[in-house]
């Protein structure tokens, strides 16, 4: 269980002051700015801004960790479509290092946009076996990996987008001494895929329906639906054949005094007889089934439903309470021993006009465990 977390927001030199922002997705320029075309062009609903948040934490999985998360947000006339580049760098006392970069760029006419992810990691981790029941196994290993994810979209309508989905993953697993000795028996029980160096080259399609007034923190009634299919084949150079299918539905319901009820249904499945073990869907972490250790339970099918009630407190500060339920199963031999339930509460601090929030959550689960999380985006 985590013992300690610490986050400091540098609000002077690192977090520039930003103008107040309305909840509207489009507004007219102020009267003074409407006198000339040049003045009108200078008006932005969202002003460019950036933030940098140093973080420190202690977790069971990481020991003491230090890092920084930040982002740059471009000028925008549309609160729904804000170009940004965000990322993070972290290092822990267990020699775990991660670099993460997430660009989201819209064209001027907003008909096309590019979303992507670059993830580099050197990460000592634990292997717990496979399934939705605790195996009692705990083996040390280290992963050296890169992931390049490319998602270009074309806006068919202002709310509907489609596009290809490209993913390039390379990974090398360095087993600990105990794991190396037991690996043959573990491979016989849980599968051989993913334990040797491998490359996965995937291509697919995705569909998105999005009516949110803001992608980072919706405040108006809105829906979000994303369906994606991604296929990795040996014909494209992948080490293994696998197909990943994902459904993500979210709804945001304003209640009163700026409060919002948000809920999500998320389904992820990995089809194929040889899916690398680190590509299997799992529960736990800062976004899905908060309160459970990440990757403690994994298999080829994962489902989750979660709800969160978001409450403004004072100016930039907000609170949230949340609950989630879900599990992983083997779709070829489906059974659930004990459905997993997570719950908790947290605080949010708005960092800029784009409604990006610093998020700190304290979560528990129906197995008697508790976790801390800190990040710079919402869970959903």
Image: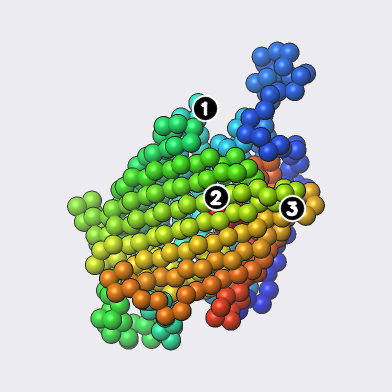
Quick one: 53 or 77, which is closer to the camera?
A: 77
- Residue shown at 33%/73% (left/top)? 334
- Can you name the residue that lies furthest to the front here? 255
Image quadrant for the N terminus? bottom right
Crowd band around label 2 with a 10 angstrom C-alpha radius: few (<14), some (14–19), many (20+): many
Contact between labelled residues 1 and 3, with CB atoms less than 8 Å apart: no
Q: Horizontal and vertical percent for residue 260?
A: 66, 51
Residue 251's disc is 2
Q: Nearer the viewer, mark 3 or mark 1?
A: 3
Q: Earlier in the sequence, mark 2 or mark 1?
A: 1
Q: Which residue is mark 1?
A: 108
The quadrant where residue 313 appears? bottom right
Q: Nearer the viewer, mark 2 or mark 1?
A: 2
Q: Horizontal and vertical percent for residue 357?
A: 66, 52
Image quadrant for the C terminus? bottom right
Question: Does residue 142 appear anywhere in the picture?
Answer: no
Question: Does residue 341 appear anywhere in the picture?
Answer: yes
């Amino acid at each position: 269980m985590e013992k300690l977390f610490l986050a400091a927001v540098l609000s002077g030199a690192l977090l520039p002051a930003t103008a107040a922002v309305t909840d509207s997705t489009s507004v007219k320029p102020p009267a003074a700015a409407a006198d000339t075309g040049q003045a009108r062009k200078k008006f932005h609903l969202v002003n460019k801004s950036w933030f940098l948040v140093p973080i420190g934490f202690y977790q069971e999985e990481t020991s003491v960790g230090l890092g920084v998360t930040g982002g740059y947000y471009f000028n925008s006339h549309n609160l729904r479509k804000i170009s940004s580049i965000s990322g993070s760098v972290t290092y822990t006392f267990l020699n775990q290092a991660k670099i993460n970069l997430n660009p989201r760029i819209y064209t001027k006419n907003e008909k096309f946009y590019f979303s992507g992810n670059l993830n580099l990691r050197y990460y000592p981790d634990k292997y717990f076996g496979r399934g939705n029941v605790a195996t009692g196994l705990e083996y040390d290993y280290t992963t050296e990996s890169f992931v390049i994810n490319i998602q270009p979209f074309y806006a068919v309508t202002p709310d509907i987008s489609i596009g290809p989905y490209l993913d390039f993953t390379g990974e090398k697993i360095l087993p600990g001494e105990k794991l190396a000795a037991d690996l043959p028996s573990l491979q016989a029980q849980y599968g051989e895929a993913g334990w040797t160096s491998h490359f996965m080259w995937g291509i697919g399609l995705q569909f998105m329906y999005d009516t949110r007034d803001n992608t980072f923190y919706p405040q108006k009634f809105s829906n979000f639906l994303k369906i994606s299919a991604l296929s990795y084949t040996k014909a494209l150079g992948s080490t293994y054949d696998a197909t990943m299918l994902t459904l993500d539905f979210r709804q945001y319901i304003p209640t009163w005094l700026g409060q919002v009820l948000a809920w999500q249904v998320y389904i992820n499945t990995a089809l194929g007889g040889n899916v690398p073990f680190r590509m299997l869907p799992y529960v736990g972490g800062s976004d899905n089934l908060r309160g459970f250790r990440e990757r403690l339970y994994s298999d080829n099918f994962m489902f989750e439903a979660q709800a969160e009630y978001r409450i403004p407190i004072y100016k930039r500060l907000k609170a949230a309470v949340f609950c989630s339920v879900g599990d992983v199963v083997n779709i070829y031999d489906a059974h659930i021993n004990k459905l997993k339930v997570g719950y908790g509460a947290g605080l949010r601090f708005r960092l800029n006009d784009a409604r990006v929030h610093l998020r700190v959550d304290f979560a528990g689960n129906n197995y008697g465990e508790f976790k801390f999380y800190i990040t710079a985006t919402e869970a959903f």
